[in-house]
Amino acid sequence: MKFLRYFGWTIFPAALVGVYLTFGLPYLNATYDFRNNGKGYDPWAKRHYLRCTYWNPKGDITIYPMDGKCPRIKFFKSGRG
């Protein structure tokens, strides 16, 4: 039980390293372009996104989604899409 007391704190950093190695770094959606659906300004209308730019302190990445979806947070491995 003393092992857990002294080294239990290492579980959280190990989990972070595991997420990094599995999924990559998280990037936040900074800017995007979408196709107008013909309804004028309607914030709840479905949109088809054409370009998404994601930001991270290491830099930014721009992608052109084929499915028209642009999630708020996306993981990229080794700084590339």
Image: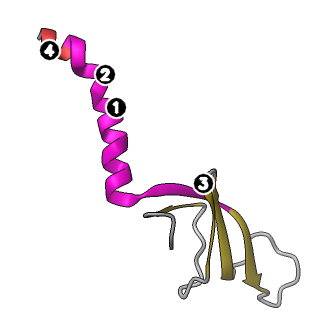
Q: Position of residue 63 (x, y in %)?
A: 60, 78
Of the two numbered discs 3 and 1 in the rendering, the one whose residue sits closer to the viewer: 3
Q: Residue at x 14, y 8 (%)?
A: 2
Q: Regarding mark 3 in the picture, which secondary structure is present there?
A: loop
* Outermost residue to the left: 1
The quadrant the N terminus occupies is top left
Residue range of the region highlighted in magenta in the rendering: 5-29
Is residue 14 shown in magenta?
A: yes
Q: The disc labelled 4 sits on which kind of residue?
A: Phe
Q: Which residue is drawn at 63% across and 50% down?
A: 57
Structural distance between the alpha carbons of marks 1 and 4: 15 Å
**According to the image, label 3 marks what residue?**
58
Q: Position of residue 20 (x, y in %)?
A: 38, 51
In the rendered structure, which disc, 4 or 2, sits on the residue that comes first in sequence?
Answer: 4
Q: Regarding mark 4 in the picture, which secondary structure is present there?
A: helix
- Determine crowd level at label 3: few under 14, some 14-19, many 20+ residues with C-alpha closer than 10 A: few
Structural distance between the alpha carbons of marks 3 and 2: 27 Å
